[in-house]
Image (tube, rainbow, N blue to C red):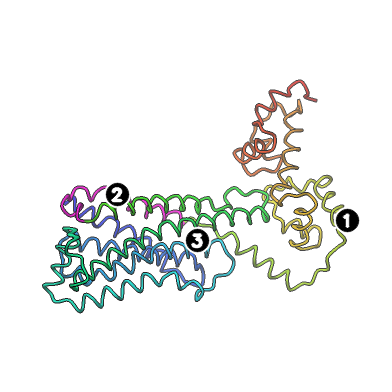
Amino acid sequence: MIQTIALLSPIYVTLFWGIIFLVQKRSDNAPRWTLGLFLIFACFLYISHAIFFSRLYHLYAFFESIYLYTGLSLYPLFYTYILKLTTHSFKTPRHLFHFIPGVLFGVVSLLLTLTLSPEQRIYYVKHILVETNLKAINFNTLPGIKGYIFLLSRIVFILQTIVYLMLVIRLSNQHNKTINHYFSNTEGKKMNWVRNLSILAFAVSVAAIAFALLGRSYFIHHNLSLLIPSVFFTTIFFLIGYKGNMQREIFEILYEQEENNADEEIPEPPEDDLKTRLLKLFEHDKIYQVNELRISTVCESLLTNRTYISKLINDEFEMNFNEFVNKYRVEEAKQLLLSRENNKFTMEYIAQQAGFGSVASFSRVFKEIEGTTPGKYREKNSSKMA
């Protein structure tokens, strides 16, 4: 009973989320559809596990090609999912090479299985995979060759966990930097769930490497030990599905706006004139108090486009849009904190008046700029209150 639960739990979770994402139109949300494909592949991977640990050795001999194909395609699919979330364009043909290892090992494994006799297939699974008999792995026999292929696939899998983790972290960092050029409040827009998924991917990678080194033979002889990886991976894939289901498309509207603006040829204004109007917009009109201020809003107010505004802020003030806006917001907050009239108001009120999206982001940004929290700043400067 415990073994059945351990084997079926990850299958049910991955199948559940996979169906949810795949029933949507691919054209409507390509990232979610890719995530659905990733979870279905994981489902087939765990079906292969279930067949193996149920000791259906003859059936597993054929299913191993699916096991290798899906296993070596999981990290490329996860990377593709993150790539589609964090970039505007995605060229499918250019990224197909990521899936070559899975296809190659899957096809070779299937061809060798078809070549083996029924007795050799049972021998391969029982003596090479279950008993991990290294002496049986040699190039003089077809089961031995198949054993070498399997070991080589495990090495490739371990390398994938490292390479794709680095790629996903790099994509996440690039995305976070880009977001700073679009939004004043980045909370909830930096796709922190992508960072969380990266952490989960790292946890999966470490666990996968550990389980690969330990070998499946240990788990087939100790059925209760199956609960450990089962609970772990079931939880991981549930969280991946849950986070993916809550995803927000940040770039869709932004790129649509840029494409529309690209159709309108806006001449580049004189830098001094643009700088003067920008400073007036912030210092006199206090546009930074708009809670969800975007660079597109500033562009509309100044009748220009994002390229000119970003270039001006980056070159003239040596900061990105997010830092530029937060500088004004912190100065506004400092005035409110030192005002006797506002001393009775809460941090929530001051954060809102300064334009921050939440007290948490207010405190974080204030400490980054001033080196202390808003509360301690007010206490330290209480004698300066006007």
Q: What element carries label 1?
A: helix
Q: Is mark 2 on a helix, strand or loop?
A: helix
Residue 229 image offset from top left, x and y in percent:
28, 50
Sequence-earlier tag: 1 or 2: 2
Write down the residue under mark 1.
272
* Image-based side of 297 in relation to 230, left or right: right
**Residues at marks 1 and 3, CA–CA distance in whole angstroms:** 40 Å
Q: Quadrant of residue 64?
A: bottom left
Q: Residue 231 carries which label?
A: 2
Which residues are the magenta region?
A: 217-245
| In the image: residue 269, left or right of residue 15 | right
Residue indicated by mark 3? 82
Question: Looking at this view, is 192 or 214 the one in front?
Answer: 214
Kind of residue at disc 1 = Asp
Please give left or right for residue 8 compared with residue 345 in the image.
left
Q: Which residue is drawn at 57% across and 64% down?
A: 87
Secondary structure that dominates the magenta span: helix
> At 37% from the left edge and 55% from the top edge, which residue is drawn?
237
Residue found at the far top of this picture: 383
